[in-house]
Image: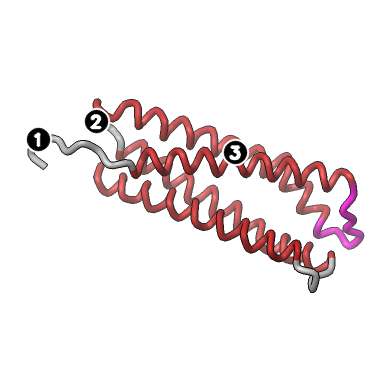
């Protein structure tokens, strides 16, 4: 069970890093594309963000559970502390971002009178910062959980 959980944690965290990178690349491309007006950009953001947070919570949560079960040996205590601390912080940040930043942004871009005013710009900057920190925390956890271990006798 321990080895299977570790494999699941490695897969989930690596999948999240890739999915988040893809999201950021495609979102930036769409937002700077001159062919899209504000209405299209708002629609694309409204479609994509719920999936982003759903996959984020799901994959990071699975990675957390798999890490807690999979990294148990006494010689891996430091690795376990890095992984668990990084993922707990990442999940807390993700939840804060979802409630305090994403929800108001979503309401702004789905409103029939959607205007990208100063509040939108401020919330968007907060979202960029929080998500950047979140991805770095997940990357740290993914690196720690994927880092090779010294084989124990009998392996």
Which residue appears farthest toward the bottom when viewing the image?
A: 35
Q: How far apart are marks 3 and 2 (CA)?
A: 29 Å
Q: Do the residues labelled 1 and 2 touch (CB within 8 Å)?
A: no
Q: Label 3: which residue?
A: 133
- Mark 1 Cα within 10 Å, few/some/many (few <14, many 20+)? few
Relative depth, front residue between 93 and 137: 137
Where does residue 34 sit, x and y in percent of width and height? 80, 69
Q: Distance between the residues labelled 1 and 2?
A: 13 Å
Q: Label 2: which residue?
A: 73
Which stretch did the figure color magenta? Answer: 109-117
Q: Label 1: which residue?
A: 153
In which image quadrant can residue 150 be found?
top left
Q: Does the magenta stretch include residue 134?
A: no
Where does residue 18 sit, x and y in percent of width and height? 49, 56
Which residue appears farthest toward the left when viewing the image?
A: 154
Is 78 on the left or on the right of 126, as rendered? Answer: left
């Amino acid at each position: 069970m321990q080895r299977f959980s570790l494999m699941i944690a490695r897969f989930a965290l690596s999948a999240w890093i890739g999915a988040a990178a893809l999201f950021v690349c495609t979102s930036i491309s769409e937002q700077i594309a001159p062919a899209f007006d504000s209405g299209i950009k708002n629609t694309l953001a409204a479609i994509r963000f719920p999936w982003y947070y759903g996959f984020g919570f799901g994959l990071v949560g699975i990675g957390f559970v798999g890490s807690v079960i999979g990294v148990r040996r006494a010689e891996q205590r430091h690795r376990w502390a890095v992984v668990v601390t990084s993922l707990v912080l990442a999940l807390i940040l993700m939840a804060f971002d979802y409630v305090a930043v994403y929800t108001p942004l979503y309401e702004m871009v789905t409103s029939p009178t959607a205007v990208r005013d100063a509040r939108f710009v401020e919330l968007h900057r907060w979202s960029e910062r929080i998500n950047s920190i979140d991805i770095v925390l997940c990357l740290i956890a993914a690196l720690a959980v994927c880092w090779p271990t010294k084989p124990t006798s009998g392996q």
